[in-house]
Amino acid sequence: MRKTPGLTRRLSLLSLLIASVITSGCDELLPKRSAGEKLYRKHCADCHGFDGAGNTIGYMGNEHADLLDDRWKHGGDPSAIHWVLRNELVFRHPSYVDLTDQEIRQITDHIL
């Protein structure tokens, strides 16, 4: 069976759509995620990874990106995590001034 260019293009687009849904971690497909996990995935996972190991393209090898090793520069207690999320660390970590205190607590709970 010979594929037509139009069919090949549609199959490619369908494959891309399926891959996008799978890799995006679509909250609609997995609604049981906590609010903290959803916020973490949105704001933190690009650098720290979905599992917190820091094995991402831009941060692999950065000792501060690994949240699983218990060697946190500013400490791993809730107040330290809150401080890091609120205050920009030049060239290291963005500040999330748009997040509420409750959202920061939810991310902290998810991390811990």
Image (cartoon, grey):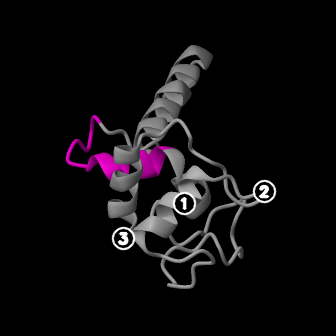
Q: Nearer the viewer, residue 65 or 75?
A: 75
Measured in 3D between alpha carbons, the distance from the residue under mark 1 to the one under mark 3, in whole angstroms, is 15 Å
For label 1, the crowd category at 10 Å Cα-Cα, with few meaning under 14, some 14 to 19 and many 20 or more, is some
Amino acid type, residue under disc 2 in the picture: Val
Give yes or no for contact between labels 1 and 3 (Cβ–Cβ under 8 Å). no
In the rendered structure, does residue 36 fall within the stretch colored magenta?
yes
Residue found at x 67% / y 57%: 93
Provide the residue designation for mark 3.
Answer: 112
Q: Is residue 70 left or right of residue 31?
A: right
Q: Say whether disc 1 or disc 2 marks the residue closer to the N-terminus.
A: 1
Q: Which mark is residue 90?
A: 2
Position above or below: 66 against 101: below
Mark 3 secondary-structure assignment: loop
Residue 91 in sight from this viewpoint: yes
Residue found at x 29% / y 46%: 35
Amino acid type, residue under disc 1 in the picture: Trp
Range of magenta residues: 28-42
Q: Nearer the viewer, residue 82 or 55?
A: 82
Q: Which residue in the rendered view is the most extreme toward the top?
A: 6
- Comparing labels 1 and 3, the label whose residue is closer to the camera: 1
Q: Say whether disc 2 or disc 3 marks the residue closer to the N-terminus.
A: 2
Percent x, y of residue 23: 46, 46
Provide the residue designation for mark 1.
Answer: 83
Q: Nearer the viewer, residue 51 or 98?
A: 98
Percent x, y of residue 33: 26, 49
Give yes or no for contact between labels 1 and 2 (Cβ–Cβ under 8 Å). no
Amino acid type, residue under disc 3 in the picture: Leu
Q: Say whether disc 1 or disc 3 marks the residue closer to the N-terminus.
A: 1
Q: How many marks can you see?
A: 3
Mark 1 secondary-structure assignment: helix
- Comparing labels 1 and 2, the label whose residue is closer to the camera: 1
Residue 3 in sight from this viewpoint: no
